[in-house]
Image: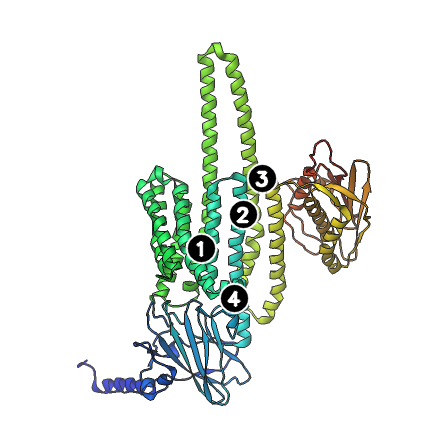
Amino acid sequence: MRYLPKSFLAIFLFQLAWFNVNGQGPATTLTEPGQTYQLDEHATILIDSVGYLTFEQILDPDQQKRFLPSGKKSLTFGYLNKPIWIKLTIANSAKSATWYLEIPAPYLEYVDFYQRKEGRWTKSSGGYYLPHSEKEISHTGFSFELNFGEQVPIDVYVRVAGNSPKNIPLFVVEKEKFIEKSRFEDLGYGVFFGVLLVMILFNLVIYLTLRDINYLIYVFIICCTFSIFASASGYGGKFLWPNYPYTNFFAGRLSLGLMVILISIFSRRFLETKRYSKLMHNILTALVPLAIIAIVLVATETMSSAGNNLMSVATPIFLISGIVCWAKGNKNAQFFVAAWAMYLIGGLSLTLRNSGVLPFNFWTTHLAEVGAACETFLIALALSARYTRLKKENEEAQLELIAQLQKNHHLQQQTTTQLEEKVNERTREIQQQNEKLTKLNLLKDKLFSIISHDIKSPLSQLSGTLYLVERDMISKDEIKDLMPQIRRNLVNNENFLAELLAWTRNQLEGGKINRGYFNLKAAADEIVTLIQPQAEAKKIKLTNHLRDTVNVYGDVEMVKTVIRNLLVNAVKFTSDGGTIDISVRVKNEFTTFFVADSGVGIDPEKQKTLFTMSVESTRGTANEKGTGLGLLICKDFVSNNGGEIWVESEPEKGSRFAFTIPNHPSQNFRLE
């Protein structure tokens, strides 16, 4: 210090004294309603080392002198277990605008906001334990409306307390921009949670098909991931349990311990740790009782962070287990390692941000969600690779068995006839198994092809739109123009998932056929009611000629699915102002159901592949999109009910689809 020029030292001491005396930095002036103002570095801070300062004491001039400039572009204090007082001085030149102070940190436990209204100080409370329904402004974080009145500039105070990480980002946002920003945040998290739900349903279908317990365990792991992020992001408290904040707390914290148990079991089974590393097998086994202890500590509120601490320790263990098993020859472990590396990176960035090492920004906040989504997808790939390997090993074992049987045939001539019968029987079993495996492999390829095209494309478009919005590279009018397309894409994805689940459930024999008598007109009327808005949108006249007396025998839900697909296709390929007619023809054994339209018709060559897996989706007259599964589902469901389906069509002359339904149980069906 002695080497500094005296004039420089004097200036430095004067500035320090000025800040200590005034207890505040320069006012932040709000000028542009379209701009978001981050106030972290403009705030002045007072750390309540005692923990008992009241707001009246804070207003005391002696306490005001203790406020110091933050000096930080991001207010991160790590796990500081002391209340923090924040003072902001704000001026407003945009008089007609309504401004919100936003703190996008839903994990903060206690947040109090003070400002002057009509000449007196008022207090608004927030925090993790405040029911969402009692918040003044519905938001996953905390938002407070600023009251400027006639006072320019104004002082506002924020008090943050609790044991959670003290990361306190401060933004001032104009009301309309705040609403717009909240909508896009809801949309982004909707996509994230939608991906998790899709993976839950997909793996559940695979489990019901293969009966491999690993898929069921993985379904529960994704459910825990859903619960943890729903709790941490604030969306669980906003939409699932708005009146029960403690439910939000325990849903996230208890799921952490349960998730460690499930992943430990899954890792031992998937990595085959008994075979490749007994040490890692024992370590993974030891995590289970530790997780149970963590759950008890959280449930009794003895140590609320026990689940977080255990997950921080367990995640590197899972990664190391995968690396060890991979190094010792388990090729399936490579996807497992990649999955947990992504998860570890996301969790590490969040931990470093909570500790105050990294700043509060988009990536440190959402990299954990990105890592979780990648981990979910990669583990699904790992399960698929494991299944492929087991299939290959099964085929090799079968080939070895055949070779051994053939060798025994040459060595034991006296048992030639008996061995030939056994070999032939085993060969037939192998062929049946190979046919089944080939069918499952084709099914897998078709599923991944459809998922990668029909889900990835709309999500990529949505991601690109969000990218432009985040960087203010797109106007509000352009956003409004894009919203209908985004909404149509989401509706298409919903229809796609419905068709996908129906098709895979039927193909993999996971569903049950519930046959019985039902009124065909009532079933058709129900579907017509659903399809009518789509027809009216294209000014198509949809007429149902069925009579109330038509009763048939079959699975009513399957029949309604067939009718829905045929009507959707009819609307799709009929131009504006066209017609669609529904009729039936009743005979002794069967009733034939007809759907005739005045649409574009079907080329004769294409008719040959309409009801097969080779059919390709074609866009409709209004550029409607499909998946190519509808008619395949129709054929399977009609066949399951003992009927037939066909089409009569000529290009530009419309089409007439028809299928038959038994009127009564035949000898092939048992009356249930």
| Mark 2, secondary structure of its residue | helix
For badge 1, the amino acid type reads Ala
| Mark 3, secondary structure of its residue | loop
Name the N-terminal-most of marks 1 and 2: 2
Q: Residue furthest top?
A: 414
For badge 3, the amino acid type reads Leu
Measured Cα–Cα span from mark 2 to mark 4: 29 Å
Name the residue carrying label 3.
508
Residue occupying the point 76% across, 46% down: 520
Measured Cα–Cα span from mark 1 to mark 4: 25 Å
**Residue 219 picture location, percent across and down:** 49, 48
Name the residue carrying label 2.
202
Name the residue carrying label 4.
242
Name the residue carrying label 1.
372
Crowd class of label 4 (few under 14; some 14 to 19; many from 20; radius 10 Å): some
Residue occupying the point 32% across, 40% down: 277
Crowd class of label 1 (few under 14; some 14 to 19; many from 20; radius 10 Å): many
Res 123 → quadrant: bottom left
